[in-house]
Image (cartoon, rainbow, N blue to C red):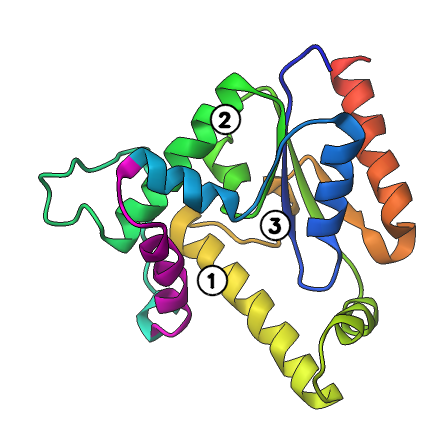
Amino acid sequence: MEKNIVFTIAREYGSGGRTIGKMLAERLDIPFYDREILRLASDESGISELLFAEADEKLKGNLLFNISRSVYDGSVLGPDSDDYASTKNLFNFQAKVIKELAKTQSCVIVGRCADFILKDYDNVIRIFIYADEEFNFNRAMERNSMTEGEMRKYIAKRNKYRGDYYKHYTGRDWHDARQYDLCLNSGKLGFEKTLQSIQSYQEIRFGD
């Protein structure tokens, strides 16, 4: 791949978006980033990687998170600030890392609101992977030991958190197709054809 192209993948729980992202990275022989962003942000900021992980967990249990907004504006606070290790600044450091990656290499980035962070970058293909409820449920049941009722609640909870997280940091609706270049139903296409669809779009838009 001669041109520097970044693929961002947002996905519903159980749709296989992360797996498809890894398949894409392997097919194109480019780096894959998910939680690796936390390590890179830790290296960039000097803040413990554990704090980055804990910040996400704290948001899951914060009732105000569902209604509050902290829309990313590109700023990063310095170490002399009292809010240097705040949840917002930790997100901002992740965003800084994502921007640096987009400027320097082709890669696949899963989650982290990367599509929004890179919304002004012309070399980005923004993808949303989804599937019908039963496909997501059946796939999730293959990988987890929960009752049917527990799993359906867990999927709903995970997707709600992803939507709330996206809304909190972007001010936008996670399911709004206008955020993305491609919205693909992995349940209808299967993983291989979903991957082929992404590569076909890449070739049409950027050439071979």
Does 60 appear in magenta? yes
Label 1 vs label 2, nearer the camera: 2
- Residue 53 vs residue 59, the one in the foreground: 53
State yes or no: discs 3 and 1 in contact (Cβ < 8 Å): no
Q: Amino acid at mark 2?
A: Leu
- Residue 166 vs residue 36, the one in the foreground: 36
Q: Circle 3 sits on which residue?
A: 176
**In this rendering, would 197 be left or right of 130?**
right
Q: Quadrant of residue 160?
A: bottom right
Q: Is residue 145 visible?
A: yes
- Residue 151 vs residue 125, the one in the foreground: 151
Q: Which mark is residue 164?
A: 1
Q: Secondary structure at mark 1?
A: helix
User: How far across and how far down the image is residue 177, in percent?
Assistant: 66, 46
* Neighbour tally class for label 1: few under 14, some 14-19, many 20 plus, Cα within 10 Å: many
The quarter of the picture where the N terminus appears is top right
Q: Amino acid at mark 3?
A: Asp
Our reading of the magenta stretch's main secondary structure is helix
Q: Amino acid at mark 1?
A: Asp
Q: Circle 2 sits on which residue?
A: 101
Marks 3 and 1 sit apart, C-alpha to C-alpha, by 13 Å
**In this rendering, would 206 be left or right of 173?**
right
Looking at marks 3 and 1 on the same chain, the residue that comes earlier in the sequence is marked by: 1
Label 2 vs label 3, nearer the camera: 2
Image: magenta residue range: 45-62
Looking at marks 2 and 3 on the same chain, the residue that comes earlier in the sequence is marked by: 2
Q: Secondary structure at mark 3?
A: loop
Q: Residue at x 37, y 39 (%)?
A: 41
Q: Is residue 72 visible?
A: no
